Image (cartoon, grey):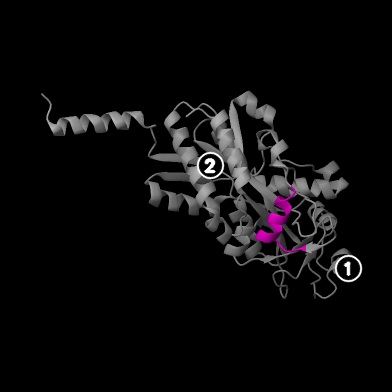
Amino acid sequence: MKTSTQIALLVAAAMAAALPAHAAEITGAGSTFVYPILSKWSADYSTKAGINVNYQSIGSGGGLAQIKAATVDFGASDSPMKPADLQKLGMGQFPLVVGGIAPVVNIDGVQAGQMRFSGPMLADIYLGKIQNWNDPAIVKLNPDLKLPNAAIAVVHRSDGSGTTFNWVNYLSKVSPEWKDKVGEGTAVEWPIGVGGKGNEGVATYVTQTKNSIGYVEYAYVIQNKMTYGLVQNKAGKFITPNAASFQAAAASADWGNAKDFYLIMTDAPGEGAYPIAATVFMIMYKQAKDASRTTTTLDFFKWALEHGQQQANDLDYVPLPPSLVQQIESYWAAQFKS
């Protein structure tokens, strides 16, 4: 005859067996764009759930390579995969957060928010057609600034990057010459400039190099106290990169008709829309070898989407609206086997 203690142990074991298995650690790699918020969410989730989220900020190209090789539980990319490619690989993707990419400069006497850029001007700088800060095209948009007669030091990403994808996707939309000569992708053949690895590398180069220009995710602008420029949008307004202008750009996104959430947000319409807003996407196998890891990974993202809004706001990202979160959770239920 079993004792009450033995019965209690048997009941506890049966209950544990009935619960879904959870991994103690999950791994991800990719986007440096999302690293500031993902690291904050990871720390908070570890405190709450006792599960570590080990994320490598190596660039979207590296993250896509690692998830394809199944060496991580999720890849993070600011460049969405096309639905046909996802289907071929047995993968799914979903958005996690919205942010923006800002041009940053290091020019003596120029403060944050003073410099104005148009899209075609940015394209011409990165094409090497505009080479000096006192070029008439720049002076015309910035008559109140004292700009130096100095060569522009152009900085871009050296690694495969979703930040680059959104930057050059935007330049391709506003400059036919850029589209024809360079085009878009996570990596391109840059006409000029020096490369930095990750948003971190570009931020470091620009901070250390006088008369330079680069592009970084806005959280890095805030963290490094960088001098950002305004960018002219479709409505002709010069827009400050911040959570409000990213939200204005996101407001035009039609996620309901985007298969596998394939949507690119650059050059969005709207008076207050920032023109280089971007979404970061999580990419996973629909049926991983270890189902417990899929369960844990989706639990983490569910927590982040439902409870991480304040952290996102604090870092000037835009959390996804509740209607889109519901759409994502329905997608998980239909597509992922855990």
Q: Amino acid at mark 2?
A: Ala
**Position of residue 49 in the picture relative to residue 178 (left or right):** left
Foreground pick, 50 / 229: 50
Q: Let me know if residue 303 appears in the view.
A: yes
Q: Is residue 208 above or below residue 120?
A: below
Q: Amino acid at mark 1?
A: Lys
Q: Let me know if residue 62 appears in the view.
A: no
Residue 297, disc:
none
For mark 2, does the 10 Å Cα neighbourhood hold few (<14), some (14 to 19), or many (20 or more) residues?
many
Which residue has dot 1 on it?
A: 140
Mark 2 and mark 1: Cα distance apart in space: 43 Å
Q: Is 319 inside the magenta-drawn segment?
A: no
| Quarter assignment of residue 124 | bottom right
Residue 322: image x %, image y %? 60, 47
Q: Is residue 108 above or below residue 190?
A: below
In the rendered view of the protein, which quadrant contains the N terminus? top left
Q: Is residue 190 above or below residue 259?
A: below
Q: In the image, what residue occupies the spot 86% across and 65% down?
A: 135
The answer to which of marks 2 and 1 sits earlier in the sequence is 2
Residue 189: image x %, image y %? 75, 43
Q: Are marks 2 and 1 in contact (CB under 8 Å)?
A: no
Q: In the image, what residue occupies the spot 70% across and 50% down?
A: 250
Residue 188: image x %, image y %? 73, 42
**Position of residue 276 in the picture relative to residue 10 (left or right):** right
Assign a secondary structure to mark 1: helix
| Quarter assignment of residue 61 | top right
Which residue has dot 2 on it?
A: 29
Q: Which residues are magenta?
A: 239-252
Q: Is 246 inside the magenta-drawn segment?
A: yes
Foreground pick, 111 / 181: 111
For mark 1, does the 10 Å Cα neighbourhood hold few (<14), some (14 to 19), or many (20 or more) residues?
few
